[in-house]
Image (spheres, rainbow, N blue to C red):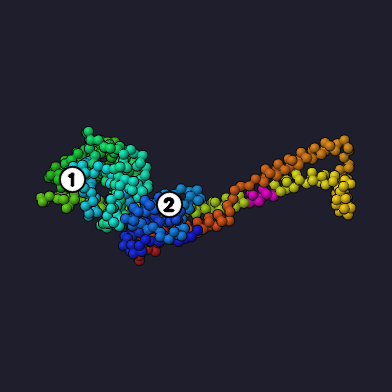
Amino acid sequence: MSKKQRVSSNPTEKITLSLNERILRECHGLYADSDKDDYTKELRTNRQKIMFYLRCDYPKNDSCHHQGLVSMAKSVDLALLTPRNKITVLLIGNHSAGKSSFINWYVEEHIQKTGVAIETQGFTFVTSGKKRETLTGNATLHLYPHFKPLQRFEGVVEYLTTEISTSKQKKFSVITFIDTPGLVDGDMSYPFDVDKTIQWLGNMADLIFVFFDPIGQALCKRTLNIVECLNRKHGDRLRFYLSKADTAGTETDRQRVMMQITQELCKRPGLNKTGFDMPTIYIPSMMSGKPTRCENQIEDVCKTVEKTIGQTIQNTLNSLENDCQRIAEAVDEKLRTNAVDSSYNLRARGKGFIFGFVGFTLPLLILVMWLVNLPLATKVLGSELTDIMKLYLVSFTDLWNTVPEDYKTNLLIIIFVVSAVFLYLSHWMARLRETMTRKQIKRMMEVQNYVTGHAKTKKEQLYEEYLTQSIGSTELS
């Protein structure tokens, strides 16, 4: 197993990556395969074209046979999940709640359409890359293969798009936003099951932002129903915000709106919890000319995202260490089991040989004794060789002659039956357990050396770099 690393499609690109982005990407690279067999014709013609627009390092050298931890784990009967190199932030809320406006503000680029009308009618993935590009449904699923189960929801794929932006603002390089359709009650018809789709996306998201619009349908029952379902499984991921807070009128009006939303949420058993928080946010660039005394906590949203990124990096690095340990222990167990099976096979071969030898010897002695006493034996073998064979068989011949003639036939039958039993026992006892070949053992040792050496060392290096940006290298022991 070669330990060659991925060859970057653009060596200068790594210099421009943020530390967090590089750590997540390198962790992802340790898990994923870069072997040429993994880049099938379909992958090259579809996903690689898509990845051209993203900062992903595809190996140009097809002779690079580097297997990732996922494949190594599979070889020792373990199942690992490849960590994603970006966090996913899902935005949900009623129609015109400011979800798209928030994405545009965070990215500092007009990517999503905004307005009073329902602009977002499908699901839009907004991510960073090399070139401004828009991808359709099938291309989106090639780019995000872990979202392929969305195909189970009828009509969703046709309403999937991905917007790739070159923006490097804030922490956008390690974030994928998912903008969802505006939720409304009444006769509004969606071309897919919007409730179940959002709930499924919530399972995949690292953060779920719920935006309530003080002017629009903040108390939309569809929104509240979805939020209640998401809260049952992923309450720790949910964050509530009163968006467009500057349009809520006076401070009294704003407090009244927040109380109404809070009361409506608390009516739901799953959402009635202590420590409920709903910061007020609005997009500074979209303020009306009138001054407002409303506190804008939109920077707290950015801090929440940054905190999640930090937690994701820590979890990824911790998982890397645990996965390496699991693989190393599994390899140890494989080698130990192989040693036990090899020892068992050696004993089994010995027992099989002994029983087989006895089973063949008894009828063979009788057959040889009978042949050398034939007149034809002297003519074929010569008198000298025949005499030598009779000399070696004299003890067995004398023993045989002590048996009365009437019992010799029965004794022959018994001897042949006993020989058959011994031969059967020889076959049964010589059954072998499956063991690894020398090549397989060598590969297991290489896997163990890789995970205990290179991968763990890389984890320590990445952890040190991550901590250095917070506390400085001088404080690290």
Question: Taken as a whole, is the magenta stretch helix, strand or loop?
Answer: helix
Name the element at disc 1. Answer: loop
* Left or right relative to 395: residue 62: left
Does 349 appear in magenta? yes
Which tag, 1 or 2, sits closer to the chain's start?
Answer: 2
Residue 412 got which mark? none
Q: Categorize mark 2 by other alpha carbons within 10 Å: few (<14), some (14-19), many (20+).
A: few
Name the element at disc 2. Answer: loop
Count of picture labels: 2
- Per the rendered image, the range of residues in magenta is 343-351
Q: Residue furthest top?
A: 187
Quarter occupied by the C terminus: bottom left
Nearer the observer, 328 or 96: 96
Tag 2 residue: 40
Nearer the observer, 458 or 37: 37
The quadrant in which residue 208 appears is top left
Q: Is residue 172 visible?
A: no
Tag 1 residue: 115
Q: Residue at x 28, y 37 (%)?
A: 191
Percent of width and height locating residue 95: 21, 41
Percent of width and height locating residue 381: 85, 52
Percent of width and height locating residue 110: 21, 52
Q: Residue at x 31, y 60 (%)?
A: 18
